């Protein structure tokens, strides 16, 4: 099954990792390409379907959609903090009598941080 959105990750050392449709780690071929992301320090993480680009900047926690910057209002800590990457795909399979089966995937990107023992996180999701 082809991935509708592929990721690109820029690390703190300036290197860039681009996911391919094969989705295989360059470090351990038994793992997905995201395994390689976990081995470094990501600073900017994006997913794209070729038409739209969704980005999380882990420097200050802002999001971008097609280059338009924004912050999500709400559960966001004040002051300096270290943002950790959140990325996952949620698959939904639907079966309906007479209609058949359908499959959709939600792609989630965002950040998480912990300050004084309190967890904060924000994500956006994109549905294929």
Image: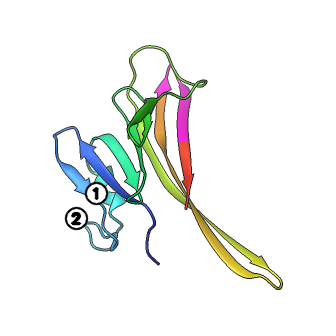
- In the rendered structure, the answer to whether residue 7 lies left or right of residue 120 reads left
Which residue position is annotated with label 1?
A: 36
State the image quarter where residue 102 is shown: bottom right
In the image, residue 120 lies in the stretch drawn in magenta? yes
C-alpha span from label 1 to label 2: 7 Å
Q: In this view, which residue lies farthest toward the top?
A: 79
Magenta extent: 114-123
Residue at image point 39% right, 55% down: 48
- Magenta: main secondary structure: strand
In contact (CB < 8 Å): disc 1 and disc 2 = yes
Rendered view: 6 above or below 57: below
SS at badge 2: loop
Q: Which mark is residue 27?
A: 2
Instruction: Name the foreground residue: 100 vs 74.
Output: 100
| Colour scheme of the rendered structure | rainbow
Q: Which mark is residue 109?
A: none
Q: Is residue 70 left or right of residue 44?
A: right
């Amino acid at each position: 099954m082809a991935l509708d959105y592929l990721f690109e990750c820029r690390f703190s050392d300036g290197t860039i990792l681009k996911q391919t449709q094969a989705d295989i780690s360059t470090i351990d071929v038994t793992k997905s390409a995201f395994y390689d992301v976990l081995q470094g320090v990501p600073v900017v993480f994006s997913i794209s379907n070729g038409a739209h680009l969704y980005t999380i900047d882990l420097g200050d926690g802002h999001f971008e959609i097609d280059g338009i910057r924004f912050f999500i209002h709400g559960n966001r800590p004040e002051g300096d903090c270290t943002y950790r990457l959140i990325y996952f795909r949620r698959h939904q399979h639907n079966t309906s009598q007479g209609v058949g089966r359908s499959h959709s995937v939600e792609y989630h990107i965002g950040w998480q941080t912990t300050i004084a023992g309190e967890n904060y996180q924000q994500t956006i999701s994109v549905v294929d």
